[in-house]
Amino acid sequence: MKEPKFKPAHIIKNIEKILLGIIAFLTVVAVLQEIYSIYINGKVQLADLLLLFIYTEVLGMIGIFYVSNKIPITLPLFIAMTAIARLIILQGKGMDPIILLYEAGAIFIIALACLAIRFKPLNTYIYQSEDEDTSNKLKNNN
């Protein structure tokens, strides 16, 4: 039996890789703009460093995807925690204390989610593996 030449999964994978390449390029542009902004201002603030850290995490996430074709769910969660921390810093000392508690609570909930994902049994990820070698390794570890 012949396999069909038109494979939607391959088209979607290629579109995904192209879009991630565009995101990577634009992230590098944003990094350069932020570095230029720091240079123009003549000082580095914690919010600037956190923004650069977010950019680094985005690039790392894209790099991991190109190597493994998977994005670990914890990376976007780390980015979210860093973004909320940056938001807290940008809001300054004049904000309502209850908002600070809500934002800190959001960081705590995301951290708990990361912890829960970290200690999830390995055999729950078998269905996600694309090759049999990875599936066999996961099965043998249990």
Image (cartoon, rainbow, N blue to C red):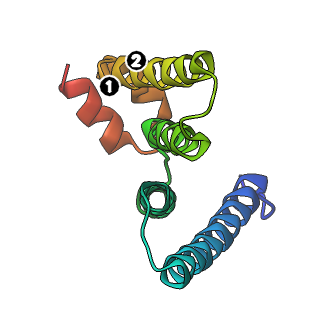
Which mark is nearer the camera, 1 or 2? 2
Q: Is residue 22 visible?
A: yes
Q: Is residue 2 visible?
A: no
Of callouts 1 and 2, the N-terminal one = 2
Residue for badge 2: 112
> Which one is nearer the viewer's eye here, 105 or 16?
105
Please, what secondary structure does the residue beneath circle 2 have? helix
Indicate which disc residue 118 carries: 1
> Compared to 49, does 25 lie above or below?
below
| Side of 29 where 59 appears, left or right | left
> Which one is nearer the viewer's eye here, 17 or 10?
17
State the CA–CA distance, disc 1 to disc 2.
10 Å
User: Which amino acid lies under the numbered mark 2 shown in the image of this protein?
Assistant: Leu
Q: Residue at x 34, y 21 (%)?
A: 115
> Compared to 127, does 80 lie above or below?
below
- Residue 2 placement (x, y as % from top left): 73, 57
User: Which amino acid lies under the numbered mark 1 shown in the image of this protein?
Assistant: Arg
Q: How many marks?
A: 2
Q: Give the crowd class for mark 1: few <14, some 14-19, many >=20 residues within 10 Å.
A: few
> Which one is nearer the viewer's eye here, 104 or 64?
104
Q: Give the crowd class for mark 2: few <14, some 14-19, many >=20 residues within 10 Å.
A: few
Quarter in which the C terminus is drawn: top left
- Residue 72 placement (x, y as % from top left): 44, 41
Q: Residue at x 42, y 60 (%)?
A: 49
